[in-house]
Amino acid sequence: MPRQTTRVIALAFAGLGAMGALAACAPATGGGGTGGGDAPASDESYADGTYTADGSYQAPSGTESITVELTLADDTVTGITVTPHATDATAKGMQSAFAGGIAAQVVGQDIDTLEITRVAGSSLTSGGFKIAIEAIKEQALAS
């Protein structure tokens, strides 16, 4: 096998090992990809209503944040609005693209199956989105 190919294969296996280690530390959220799955990951039942939470994440420009307003009915996302708060021009563009595309990814999905990694080319904003979703789930359980 050529040296270049061996290096690529070794890097691929190293990446898979790191992903497995990270997955082992992650909470079970059900679903996969960017949209969700068929069944809830838990037996939790959330109160219907509209909830709001902030989520922050690290971008090359520093800490950025978004506000997520999400409406639930029978544990299903029925509406969502993401409000960007970025201070950096690039981050503003990415957050705006994320905000414009997130509804197509989550409306109609069970909140426990949401696993968003990238929307409209924005991958870092999803970190803040995940934090906000976890806060919303806590609010909806406490209601």
Image (tube, rainbow, N blue to C red):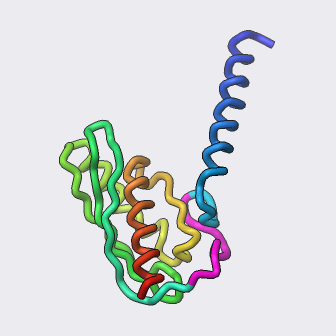
- Quarter of the image where one finds residue 39: bottom right
Which residue shows up at 42% across the image and 53% down it? 127
- Quarter of the image where one finds residue 16: top right
Between 62 and 109, the residue placed more toward the observer is 62
x and y percentages locating residue 77 in the rendered image: 47, 78
- 2 lies above or below 112: above
* 5 within the magenta span: no
Between 44 and 84, the residue placed more toward the observer is 44
x and y percentages locating residue 111 in the rendered image: 52, 74
Most extreme residue toward the top is 3
- 141 lies above or below 23: below
What's the magenta bit mostly, secondary-structure-wise?
loop
Q: Which residues are magenta?
A: 34-44
- 111 lies above or below 9: below
For the C terminus, the quadrant is bottom left
Which residue shows up at 68% across the image and 22% down it? 8
Query: Would you say 61 lies left or right of 109 here?
Result: left
For the N terminus, the quadrant is top right
x and y percentages locating residue 62 in the rendered image: 27, 41
Which residue shows up at 55% across the image and 64% down it? 35
